[in-house]
């Protein structure tokens, strides 16, 4: 795909050059030639600056965790050292082994639900996706916490030319705010002395 994009850019450059010369020859105006060049520069890049500004706005106003309620759980909701931790992968892609004190997500999911949503088309105009996760009490449906991150794929040319591969995520720890939401909502009961 990269070679095809390179060929397309070279062809686009020569097309822009030919059109700019034709505009200058037809109008006799150097100013018109520069307007034609500006149009050819803006066609592939017009959405970069407003897209980045919108992405930054979303990051500042919505990209974060919100904890509505912290739940203290008894010891049986936490793994003991040596138990399999199915919420993580080990070094070789196998199930990780708990070092002790990790949340037993399988047990927690009996009473609480976790939803994860990725809206790739959140802003098709500016190529921004929105990722949201939430934790609810199953019995009441009460929302305990949410995590929201945004993925910016760049302007339309970059987004289309690299098959959504290059992206900027916010908050900068965007992948991790969803996973560590569990650790902020649930914690062990603190003994009273």
Image (cartoon, rainbow, N blue to C red):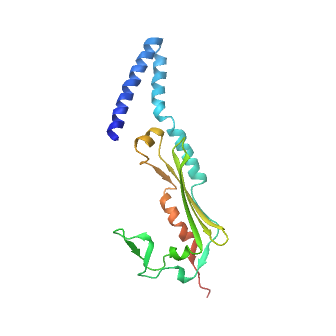
Residue 22 drawn at (x, y percent): 42, 16
Q: Nearer the viewer, residue 125 or 39?
A: 125
- Residue 19 sits above or below residue 81 on the image: above
The residue at the point 37 percent across, 32 percent down is 9
The residue at the point 54 percent across, 83 percent down is 75
Q: Nearer the viewer, residue 172 or 12?
A: 12
Residue 142 drawn at (x, y percent): 66, 68
Quadrant hosting residue 69: bottom right
- Residue 80 sits above or below residue 58 on the image: below
Hey, which residue is sitting farthest bottom in the picture? Answer: 193
The residue at the point 59 percent across, 82 percent down is 190
Q: Quadrant of the C terminus?
A: bottom right
Q: Residue 25: tell me if it is visible.
A: yes
Residue 15 drawn at (x, y percent): 39, 24
Q: Residue 28: tell me if it is visible.
A: no
Image label count: 0
- Residue 38 sits above or below residue 65 on the image: above
- Residue 113 sits above or below residue 165 on the image: below
Residue 130 drawn at (x, y percent): 54, 52
Q: Quadrant of the N terminus?
A: top left
**Going by the image, does 190 lie left or right of 164?**
right
The residue at the point 46 percent across, 21 percent down is 34
**Going by the image, does 141 lie left or right of 21?**
right
């Amino acid at each position: 795909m990269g070679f095809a994009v390179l060929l397309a850019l070279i062809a686009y450059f020569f097309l822009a050059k030919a059109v700019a010369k034709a505009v200058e020859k037809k109008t006799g105006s150097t100013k018109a030639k520069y307007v034609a060049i500006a149009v050819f520069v803006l066609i592939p890049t017009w959405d970069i600056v407003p897209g980045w500004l919108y992405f930054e706005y979303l990051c500042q106003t919505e990209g974060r965790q919100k904890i509505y309620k912290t739940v203290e759980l008894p010891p049986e909701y936490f793994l003991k050292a040596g138990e399999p931790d199915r919420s993580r992968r080990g070094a070789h892609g196998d199930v990780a082994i708990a070092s002790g004190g990790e949340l037993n997500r399988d047990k927690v999911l009996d009473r609480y639900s976790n939803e994860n949503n990725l809206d790739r088309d959140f802003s098709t105009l500016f190529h921004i996706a929105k990722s949201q996760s939430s934790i609810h009490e199953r019995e009441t449906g009460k929302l305990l916490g949410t995590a929201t991150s945004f993925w910016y794929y760049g302007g339309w040319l970059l987004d289309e030319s690299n098959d959504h591969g290059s992206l900027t995520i916010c908050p900068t720890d965007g992948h991790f705010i969803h996973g560590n939401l569990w650790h902020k909502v649930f914690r062990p009961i603190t003994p009273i002395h």
